[in-house]
């Protein structure tokens, strides 16, 4: 049975079954933290218990509307990822199937070029753009060498590792053949021939070169052209108007873009695909081959990491003040210090998490207040115990390290020696917790602030571009289908009209021939009659002459 006809999640086909593992992924991966959200679903950071390495997990749900199309897309993406391997392409690790969700496990990268733009809010330096483009082009050249088209090249799909490597990601939109004709990609980065493919023909790998040129403008100007328009208007302008160009820098304190950079972007964004640079020509362009410092990308990553820490620290500061407010809106100074020690372990992904954690902390403060009223003599010790037994909040909403001590042992305070023993035990447990969380924090590194992740989730929920593009694609397909039906109907009408006219012509020709034969017969009869009359007259004249 072909994959396209399988029920979503069906693994009876051996070729499909070998792509997935049916083991429970939660038993292998721990410390899941949501680091991104897109049209396909959510991306999580996780720690592999077997290899002790960080991984990225993309969870793709294939239930609900268009479940069969989603399932087929997952099969195609997994099969494609298993078949490729290149240093500049994010490495595939495993794929699990749990209920109606696919867990696609990939190599972990700290963030994308788009994340850096959002955090730093400044354009890249030209030397940084050249270094990023060089490694990205190597990954694109590999795909083009095996006759594949990425079809979604943009800053958001150019990832970076902790050691300064640039990786091309998100191959779910890649075409397995070149040339192709399907309408796929992100609107603002889409090549004109891709937009017009359903109407006027096919496109090849040079569509990626156009997207790459738009990405260069994005890195230099913080956004792609036409971003202030809606997606449909932008695609119309891309298809109908002249290509965009790299704008000069207005700030006199910044160095202007070089002629090589302007030339590179101009040659990538030519309307005629045949006049664009090929991938190998891009790699040989002076803008790409220019001399670059060896650690330019590593320095960029370290600079953005520091900026992320500063922004998260500021966000945590505001959050701490929020969750330390009592019912009257006054700041509870007594527990600020204890809560401040948790700032590196708190991670917020949405407003619901903030409200949930605020309620948690409010309940905790009420418990502390009751304990202090009951045990005023041991107030200092109880304060230390409240710190040592605090809840560490993680992204998945559960305690990262649940206490292993029974509740009655934690509440047992009988003698001074018992108190000291309990305090020592809690201190040792807390030390182990701190050591483990320190190890986890050293593994977890990202260029994305929690504010960016929360905003991305809200934007996805409010305005799902994937659904819009699917709707636009369905409208295009429906229009294309109706256009074909109209053409077929016109062709059939023309054929019928032609047959009707042919029959009428044949009928007229037959009538004309009959009329012609009839007239010819009448003329012949008339000629014959006149001939006989002439002959009769001639005989009479001859006879008359003889008589005379």
Image: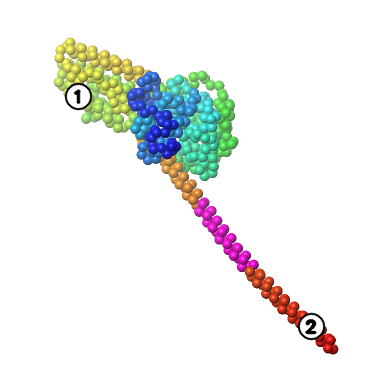
Where the N terminus falls, by quadrant? top left
Q: Which residues are magenta?
A: 487-513
- The residue depicted at 38 percent of the width and 36 percent of the height is 8
- The residue depicted at 81 percent of the width and 85 percent of the height is 543
Q: Are marks 2 and 1 in contact (CB under 8 Å)?
A: no
Q: Position of residue 249 (x, y in %)?
A: 51, 31
312 sits to left or right of 182: left
450 sits to left or right of 512: left
SS at badge 2: helix
The residue beneath circle 1 is 367
Asked whether 6 or 379 is in front, the reply is 6
- The residue depicted at 63 percent of the width and 69 percent of the height is 514
Q: Position of residue 212 (x, y in %)?
A: 51, 32
Asked whether 154 or 261 is in front, the reply is 154
Asked whether 57 or 316 is in front, the reply is 57
Q: CA distance from mark 2 to mark 1?
A: 152 Å
Mark 2 closeness class: few <14, some 14–19, many ≥20 residues within 10 Å = few
Q: Position of residue 409 (x, y in %)?
A: 19, 17
The residue beneath circle 2 is 539
SS at badge 1: helix
Between discs 2 and 1, the one toward the N terminus:
1
Mark toward the viewer: 2 or 1: 2
Where the C terminus falls, by quadrant? bottom right
The figure's colour scheme reads rainbow
* Residue 20 image-quadrant placement: top left
Mark 1 closeness class: few <14, some 14–19, many ≥20 residues within 10 Å = few
In the rendered structure, does residue 461 fall within the stretch colored magenta? no
């Amino acid at each position: 049975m072909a994959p396209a006809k399988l029920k979503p999640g069906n693994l009876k086909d051996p070729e499909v079954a070998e792509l997935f593992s049916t083991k429970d992924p939660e038993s292998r991966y721990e410390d899941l933290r949501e680091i991104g959200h897109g049209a396909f679903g959510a991306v999580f950071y996780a720690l592999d218990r077997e290899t002790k390495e960080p991984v990225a997990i993309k969870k793709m749900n294939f239930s609900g509307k268009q479940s069969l199309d989603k399932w087929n897309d997952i099969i195609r993406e997994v099969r494609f990822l298993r078949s490729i391997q290149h240093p500049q392409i994010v490495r595939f690790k495993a794929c699990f199937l749990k209920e109606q969700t696919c867990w696609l496990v990939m190599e972990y990268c700290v963030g994308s070029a788009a994340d850096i733009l959002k955090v730093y809010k400044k354009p890249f330096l030209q030397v940084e753009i050249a270094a990023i483009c060089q490694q990205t082009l190597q990954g694109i050249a590999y795909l083009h060498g095996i006759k594949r088209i990425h079809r979604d090249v943009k800053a958001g799909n150019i990832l970076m590792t902790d050691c300064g490597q640039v990786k091309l990601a998100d191959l779910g939109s890649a075409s397995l053949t070149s040339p192709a004709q399907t309408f796929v990609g992100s609107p603002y980065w889409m090549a004109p021939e891709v937009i017009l493919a359903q109407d006027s023909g096919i496109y090849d790998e040079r569509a990626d070169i156009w997207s790459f040129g738009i990405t260069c403008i994005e890195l230099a100007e913080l956004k792609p052209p036409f971003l202030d328009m809606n997606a449909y208007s932008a695609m119309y302008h891309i298809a109908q108007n002249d290509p965009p160009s790299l704008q000069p820098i207005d700030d006199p304190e910044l160095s202007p873009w070089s002629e090589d950079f302007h030339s590179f972007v101009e040659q990538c964004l030519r309307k005629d695909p045949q006049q664009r640079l090929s991938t190998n020509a891009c790699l040989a362009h002076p803008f790409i081959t220019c001399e670059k410092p060896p650690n330019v990308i590593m320095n960029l990553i370290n600079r953005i990491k520091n900026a992320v820490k500063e922004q998260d620290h500021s966000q945590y500061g505001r959050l701490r003040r929020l969750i330390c407010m009592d019912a009257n809106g006054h700041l509870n100074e007594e527990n600020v210090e204890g809560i401040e020690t948790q700032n590196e372990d708190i991670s917020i992904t949405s407003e619901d998490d903030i409200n949930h954690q605020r309620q948690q902390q409010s309940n905790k403060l009420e418990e502390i207040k009751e304990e202090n009223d009951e045990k005023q003599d041991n107030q200092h010790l109880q304060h230390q115990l409240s710190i040592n037994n605090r809840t560490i909040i993680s992204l998945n909403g559960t305690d990262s390290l649940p206490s292993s001590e029974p509740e009655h042992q934690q509440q047992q305070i009988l003698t001074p020696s018992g108190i000291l023993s309990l305090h020592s035990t809690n201190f040792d447990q807390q030390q182990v917790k701190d050591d483990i969380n320190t190890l986890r924090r050293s593994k977890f590194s990202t260029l994305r602030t929690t504010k960016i992740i929360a905003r991305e989730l809200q934007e996805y929920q409010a305005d799902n571009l994937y659904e819009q593009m699917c709707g636009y694609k369905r409208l295009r397909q429906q229009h294309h289908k109706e256009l074909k039906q109209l053409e077929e109907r016109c062709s059939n009408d023309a054929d019928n009209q032609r047959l009707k006219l042919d029959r009428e012509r044949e009928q007229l020709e037959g009538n004309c021939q009959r009329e012609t034969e009839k007239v010819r017969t009448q003329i012949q009869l008339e000629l014959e009659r006149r001939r006989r009359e002439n002959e009769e007259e001639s005989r009479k004249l001859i006879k008359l002459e003889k008589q005379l």
